[in-house]
């Protein structure tokens, strides 16, 4: 298998704090430094949330702007993907950073259960976020927590709400949402290929101890991989992950195991149809 593997590093998220793992980068400065280390290790997409000074989730566009500027300065060519996830705000505040014109942004197209609450993505908000991404030439990453989300992305694509071939990420292992199940995973791949074509790129993310499981499944199946401290604060059962870069390096090793070259940022941009940068 020779298709290069795109590695996405989810650097912070909305939930883990330094009390959980001191390596979690919560300030913008820490996030830029952590992203640079992960970029050097092989990551070509940076998926980012931002935090307040007390480590609570934020949707502050100014923080996103400083993070985006720092990553573009210190990691030239890296794909900046900003989160519109629901833990950092409500309603259209979730898309307040989209005028910054990041390369990509996450887009959850349907609701589902999370460990202690409902992750609400009502149709009107989904349509508005997609419209903003289209306006600012941002490629959405479809976060599929359920099979129906893949079909919803297909319907939005057919209606012209999502331009180009959707980039779907399977998210598995969230409590009360889709569990880690190999038959379901394989059916997700089959569904993406049926709806979007055999060459449609896709990615997978596993939560907690399932991160390495989904890395293995995705890489060995020709997909792309997500890693990082947002999804998993541990390196193994007894050891906290020392950095985002350490988790990226482990993903690179899995690529080597399956003879998958790690995509350069130039290759990643071409595969995802993103605008070129100098």
Image: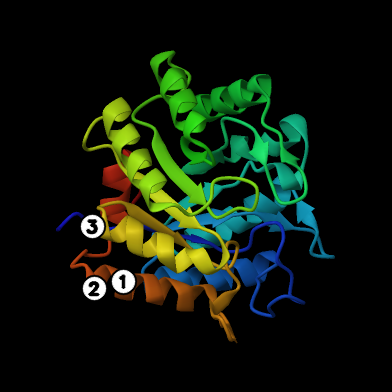
Which residue is nearer to you in this view: 120 or 25? 120
Taking the view exactly as shown, the residue that stands out farthest to the left is 2
Q: Tally the marks.
A: 3
| Relative to 126, residue 244 above or below | below
Q: Residue at x 27, y 44 (%)?
A: 271
Q: On the image, which quarter does residue 238 sit in?
A: bottom right
Q: Residue at point 47% right, 34% down? A: 147
Which residue is the site of mark 1? 254
Q: Earlier in the sequence, mark 1 or mark 3?
A: 3
Q: Nearer the viewer, residue 272 or 242?
A: 242
Q: Which part of the image, by quadrant, shows the N terminus?
A: bottom left
Q: Quadrant of residue 167?
A: top left
Q: Residue furthest bottom?
A: 238
- As measured in the structure, the alpha-carbon distance from the residue carrying label 1 to the one carrying label 3 is 13 Å
Q: Nearer the viewer, mark 2 or mark 3?
A: 2
Pointer 2 or 3: first along the chain:
3
User: Circle 3 sits on which residue?
Assistant: 4
Instruction: Give SS at disc 1.
Output: helix
Disc 1 crowd rating (10 Å Cα; few below 14, some 14-19, many 20+) is some
């Amino acid at each position: 298998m020779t298709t290069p593997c795109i590695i996405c590093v989810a650097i912070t998220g909305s939930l883990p704090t330094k009390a959980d793992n001191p390596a979690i980068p919560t300030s913008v400065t820490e996030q830029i430094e952590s992203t640079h280390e992960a970029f050097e290790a092989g990551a070509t997409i940076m998926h980012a949330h931002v935090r307040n000074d007390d480590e609570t989730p934020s949707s502050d566009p100014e923080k996103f702007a400083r993070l985006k500027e720092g990553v573009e300065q210190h990691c030239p060519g890296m794909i900046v993907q900003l989160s519109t996830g629901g833990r950092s705000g409500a309603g259209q505040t979730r898309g307040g950073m989209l005028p910054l014109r990041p390369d990509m942004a996450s887009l959850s197209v349907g609701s589902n259960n999370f460990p202690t609450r409902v992750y609400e993505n009502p149709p009107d908000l989904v349509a508005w976020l997609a419209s903003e991404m289209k306006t600012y030439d941002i490629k959405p990453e479809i976060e599929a927590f359920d099979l129906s989300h893949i079909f919803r992305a297909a319907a939005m694509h057919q209606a012209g709400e999502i331009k180009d071939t959707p980039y779907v990420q399977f998210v598995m292992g969230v409590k009360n949402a889709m569990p880690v199940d190999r038959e379901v995973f394989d059916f997700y791949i089959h569904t993406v290929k049926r709806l979007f074509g055999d060459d449609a790129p896709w990615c997978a993310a596993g939560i907690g101890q399932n991160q390495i499981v989904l890395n293995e499944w995705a890489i060995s199946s020709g997909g792309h991989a997500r890693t990082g401290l947002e999804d998993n604060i541990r390196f193994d059962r007894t050891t906290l992950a020392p950095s985002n870069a350490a988790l990226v390096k482990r993903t690179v090793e899995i690529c080597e195991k399956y003879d998958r070259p790690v995509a350069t940022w130039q290759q990643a941009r071409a595969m995802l149809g993103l605008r070129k940068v100098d």
